[in-house]
Image (spheres, rainbow, N blue to C red):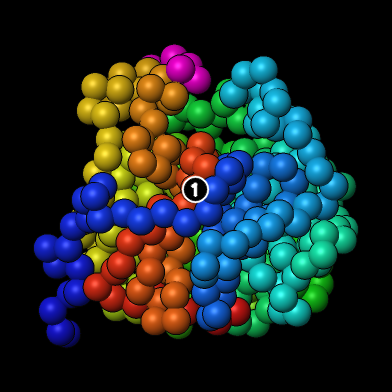
Amino acid sequence: MSKNPIDDFKVLKSDLKFIGKDLQRPECILAERDGTLWAADARGGVVKILHDGKQEIITQSHDDRFSQASNLESRFTQGTLPNGLAFAENGDFLIANFGKDLLEVMTRDGKTKTLHDNIDGEEIGKVNFVLRDSKNRIWLTISTKVKNWVEAFNPNTSDGYIAVVDQDGIRVAAEGFKFTNEIRFDAKEEYLYIVETNGRRISRMRSHPDGTLSDREIFGPSDLGGFPDGIAFDSYGNLWGTLIYAEKIFALTSEGELRIILDDGNPEAIDKLDRHFFTGKVQIDDMIACESSVAPWMASITFGGQDLKTVYVGTLKGTTIPYFTSPVAGLPMVHW
């Protein structure tokens, strides 16, 4: 195999450029071939950002409860809160709504309907991320069944799971994860890679043609040194990701070797958060103290641009989108 393009590749804060303004919680970003970006927005929809910076917000029904909540903890349990995004086959938006605990679909003019809010009559839980595969199946992660997710932010809760939606409806595909977050398929859709945020690791499972998953294993280090959130493959086979609170961008090679691409973390604050996490004493203030100066609470990675070499960084507390140039193109997503 040729030399890995990310060998010795590093990004400094000074390398970052920014697009978008006055955004609210642009956690997940979708990119289209023409340069258009779509960012999840806490006001209840998505913000469309053109390559020249012009933008508009498209909402299901404008909802300020998240942004106006008196404290951060209550913000995550009030009102609509679009989190993960994916394009439906017709270009509509599939939205994992973390605030309303459901999967919904929104047209590009804001018309919205609920697709699923329960499985076998049981509430679905904290819906986090949504992904569509090449067979037009929809994969959904549920981080926890605990209503107030902060109470599940510990090393012991393992009630996260993955659901799949196909022609037969919605069903549980795999369970027992420590705060299931973003998921991605490799280029051949042979494995599904799974972020376990509270497990501080990436797992993977073999994907079968009938939509079942098997052979769960840890991919890469058993502890990444932080809390992974979003992931995305490049075309070489490296799996890029973010460590939220540690405020790092990392990559795992196809052999599972860990590379740190960008580090804007506060070592003292990170150490305190880690100690409190492992003793079950985490407070919201511990998380706030870890905020990055350029991309506060790094949450996702999106490859875009016509050559798929522009890397956009989604954040939970930023109001703009940082980006930089990668030495290797991203793996095209199913909508590309």
* Residue at 33% in and 61% down: 324
Looking at the picture, tell me which residue is in the foreground, 235 or 59.
59
Q: Magenta region: which residues?
A: 279-285
* Residue at 53% in and 54% down: 20
Report if residue 320 lies within the magenta region. Answer: no
Tally the numbered discs. 1
Residue count near mark 1 (Cα–Cα under 10 Å), binned few <14, some 14–19, many ≥20: many
| Quarter containing the N terminus | bottom left
Expressed as whole percent of the image width and height from the top left, the position of residue 175 reads: 59, 50
Please identify the dominant SS of the magenta region. loop
* Residue at 76% in and 41% down: 80
Q: Quadrant of residue 291?
A: top left
Is 329 left or right of 119, judged from the image as shown? left
Looking at the picture, tell me which residue is in the foreground, 80 or 184.
80
Residue 115 can be seen in this image: no
Q: Quadrant of residue 186?
A: bottom left
Looking at the picture, tell me which residue is in the foreground, 31 or 127.
31
Q: Quadrant of residue 271?
A: top left
Expressed as whole percent of the image width and height from the top left, the position of residue 115 reads: 83, 59
Expressed as whole percent of the image width and height from the top left, the position of residue 113 reads: 87, 58
Residue at the spot of label 1: 320
Expressed as whole percent of the image width and height from the top left, the position of residue 50 reads: 57, 67
Is 71 left or right of 296, judged from the image as shown? right
Q: Is residue 247 above or below residue 137?
A: above
Instruction: Identify the secondary structure beneath mark 1.
Output: loop
The amino acid type of the residue labelled 1 equals Thr
Residue 229 can be seen in this image: yes
* Residue at 56% in and 75% down: 32
Is 305 left or right of 85, judged from the image as shown? left
